[in-house]
Image: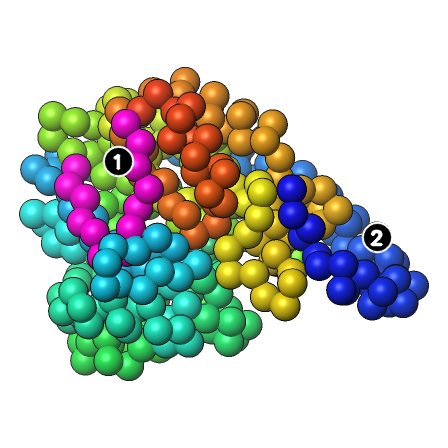
Amino acid sequence: MSFRISPVWWPVLAVASPAIVPWLLIRNRHFQDDCTRATELNHERISQAQPLEMPELDFLDLTVLVEWKAAEGFIGDAGVSYLFKTELGSMLYDVGFGPTRPALSHNAAKLDFSLDQVDALAISHLHADHIGGIAAARSRQVTVPDKLMSPKLKPCFLPDRTEAEGFKTKLVERPQLLTAGLASSGPLARSLFIFGFTEEQALLARVKGKGLVVFTGCGHPTIEVVLEMVGRLSKEPLYAVGGVLHFPVSGGRGNRAGIQFQTIIGTGKPPWQRISDEDLSRTITAINSANPKRVYLSGHDSCDHALDRMMRELNAETEVLKAGATYRF
Ligand SMILES: [Zn+2]
Ligand SMILES: [Zn+2]
């Protein structure tokens, strides 16, 4: 198991510890309070959720614009951008690191994609790897490369208050139909130590002869909570679960300066605890008991060790999503 913070940093941490330790203790108090608040809020939302009238779709196609793994000729990155198409329209889900890294622009150009071709944009949550980069996350402003923008104002469905210049922002406050026959789980919360209280929406669709397809953005609320909500929204059988489950067990993606940020931030644990194989085992058991036929894993914040375990231990037919590839449901 690798060091999450390189030993090179340890003397710096030791010198800074009189400042870091009190900050960690204060932060931990907020974090624990938010854990309770998120659990209660999710429970309330799930218990109040009503079944959604989702159209039965003839097909659902997913083309992956940004993912960690990539097909030949496409750029892989630790962000997410998924294009969903149905016979009723299309919607882009997340914009990766936006214009700040080459993946989205390069892959979109290769696929001849621009936002002109979709009916709407939906953002899973407001983290840099989904909303368009670090500056976008700091300023709470969805940021898309200029070349991909449409001159028409398209709706942008958001799980929390944010700006999205060039779009008609629509705050999603509860489960609802969005566009193209796709629905939102509504915001589901998670307390994160560094990022604080985080709201995230998953997408779901109902495909004829198959059942429900559910996709997460970063998987912060946990797939268990997402599937509990989905179970309230539809009694259709679960056909496929896809997207991000957030398991940087043996290491993170996009490590910088000897620090594995994904293993420290965004895990739902204090920085001194790491996501473990036991955590992953619990999630594998939960997915197996939900019994999807197919699982499409994201490598953007799950390490290869976690992906390998899920490929071996999930009962469903399982594959890892690749940028540039199209999947039909
Ligand atoms: Zn995230
Ligand atoms: Zn993410």
Query: Which of the two residues, 313 or 216, is positioned nearer the viewer here?
Result: 313
Sooner in the amino-acid sequence: mark 2 or mark 1: 2
Query: Which of the two residues, 236 or 108, is positioned nearer the viewer here?
Result: 108
Tell whether position 322 is magenta. yes
Q: Residue at x 79, y 49 (%)?
A: 29
165, above or below 264, in the image: below
Where residue 275 appears, as percent x and y from the top left, is: 62, 39
Q: Residues within 10 Å of mark 2 (few under 14, many from 20)?
A: few
**Which label was assigned to residue 184?**
none
**Which label was assigned to residue 213?**
1
Tell whether position 174 is magenta. no
Spatial separation of the CA atoms under disc 2 and disc 1: 41 Å
- Specify the amino acid type for callout 2: Leu
- Specify the amino acid type for callout 1: Val
Q: Which residue is mark 2?
A: 25
User: Is residue 179 toward the left or the right of residue 255 in the image?
Assistant: left
Instruction: Identify the magenta region.
Output: 317-329
